[in-house]
Amino acid sequence: MSQSHQQASLPGCPSCEEPLESGDLFCGACGYDLSAVPAPPGDRPTVAITVPAQGTGPQGTGPQGTGAQGTDAGAQGAGAVEWPAASEVDSSDHPAPTHRPTDLPGTDSGGKPLPTAAPSAVRLDEPGGTGDTSGDFELAAPDPRTAEHAGAAARGKVCVACRSGHVDPDGYCENCGHAQPRERDHMEQELGSVAAVSDRGLRHHRNEDAFAVSGTALPDGSPAVVAIVCDGVSSATRPDEASAAAAVAANGALMESLPRGTHPQQAMHDAILAASEAVNALAQEPGGATEHDAHRHQNAPACTLVGAISAGGLLVVGWVGDSRVYWVPQDRAHPPARLTEDDSWAAQMVATGLMNEAEAYADERAHAITGWLGADAYELEPHTASFKPDRPGLVVVCTDGLWNYAEAAAEMAAAVPADAYERPLHGAQVLVGHALDGGGHDNVTVALLPFAVPSQGA
């Protein structure tokens, strides 16, 4: 900045208007005594506004119409207002509540009374722009996340991944595309002394297993407990529907026949036939194979079935396919046993003496089943067996998704937790976890049925 500009910006002499420099006591041109000039007032941009008294006009004038009188009246009004002193803290050492301007009576700068109610959070101006707030109501801004969840919930199921998208009928989120877990991916049920757990596993895209556990009473009043486990044939169409239909039909047949006094072994045989009819009916339903297809039964829905009944001191098992039943005594000093024989290629090789068990189950064809429930089954041959244990134990009813990781009876007994007899649901959960830890290559389903030896009478 140049020196001339600084001098031009300094005040001039009151006598000759000659520019002055800072600190001059006399004018350099005319010799005027600058000490006699009063100092200029400081810059005070803020103007004090007095509060007018009640009854003053909108322009700050008093009732008599003069500005001076309005100012005096405003000063008197301002002095008449007694502001309450706010206490610093109360007895709980918390600051006293803050008073809003609308909590105290008074007037605004125009002399109008202050509103006594809090202003509305939303203003709805009329189309004419008058600003009339009649009919206004308070409306807080909605949380977009809450609104999104509420909208998705109103439309249906909410995605478990993004927690906001709607799940379409195919089971995928419309927002993020994430596949939703199906209801059958993991199922657990405990009914009295019997429990079952089923899991999709780690490799399959759905759970094609199904189970049913139930209890009823024999004609003499003694209890009868049932456990049914079904495994859908993956190479068939709609295997999940087949296993579910078979489990429901077999369980329903047993719940009808056992209370009538039918022998448990005969009841199991009839239940397997009822399950077969239910699975066969699926091939004729819409959505199955085309009616005009001459080979419509070649890929009909199919599944395997295994079940156990504890009734009247008897343990009855029945099966078609390669699902199994194991016996694990409560006293582990006694040996366990496998109570079923597989309808499989490996079992046939062993039964005919063509291979030993190790060679047969090491073959890639080992798990090819030779018996199943379905419209394309060659010939249905339900297998049933009846046992009368002399000691309490645990009945393990499972699919190959479990026994693939504990094939021998001793291996299965080692996998069963020690307290499974008293806690069957926990034991089933542990066994499913054992299969998942082993790889979970297949669906895993297991039902545990504690068998109690009835007390001997006189």
Image (cartoon, rainbow, N blue to C red):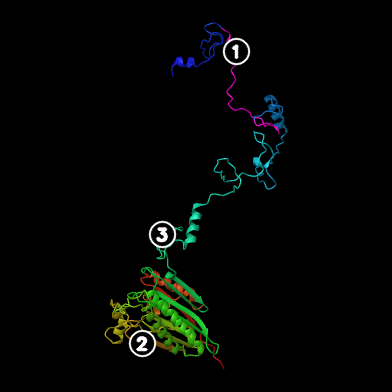
The residue shown at (45%, 79%) is 248
Query: Is the stretch drawn in magenta largely helix, strand or loop?
Result: loop
Give x and y (percent) for residue 402.
39, 75
Against 69, is 230 above or below?
below
**Quick check: is 234 in the magenta stretch?**
no
Q: CA distance from mark 2 to mark 1?
A: 128 Å
Disc 1 secondary structure class:
loop
Question: The C terminus appears in which quarter of the rendering?
Answer: bottom right
In this view, the mark in front (3 or 1): 3
Q: Which mark is residue 16?
A: none
Question: The N terminus appears in which quarter of the rendering?
Answer: top left
- Mark with earlier residue (3, 1): 1
Disc 2 secondary structure class:
loop
Q: Is residue 108 left or right of residue 415?
A: right
Against 121, is 63 above or below?
above
Corner quadrant of residue 206: bottom left
Q: Which residues are magenta?
A: 32-58
Q: Which residue is mark 3?
A: 174
Q: Which residue is mark 2?
A: 381
Query: Which residue type carries mark 3?
Result: Glu
- Mark with earlier residue (2, 1): 1
The front one of 110 and 227 is 110
Q: CA distance from mark 2 to mark 3?
A: 47 Å
Give x and y (percent) for residue 80.
73, 33
Work out whether residue 391 can be spotted.
no
Q: Which residue is mark 1?
A: 37
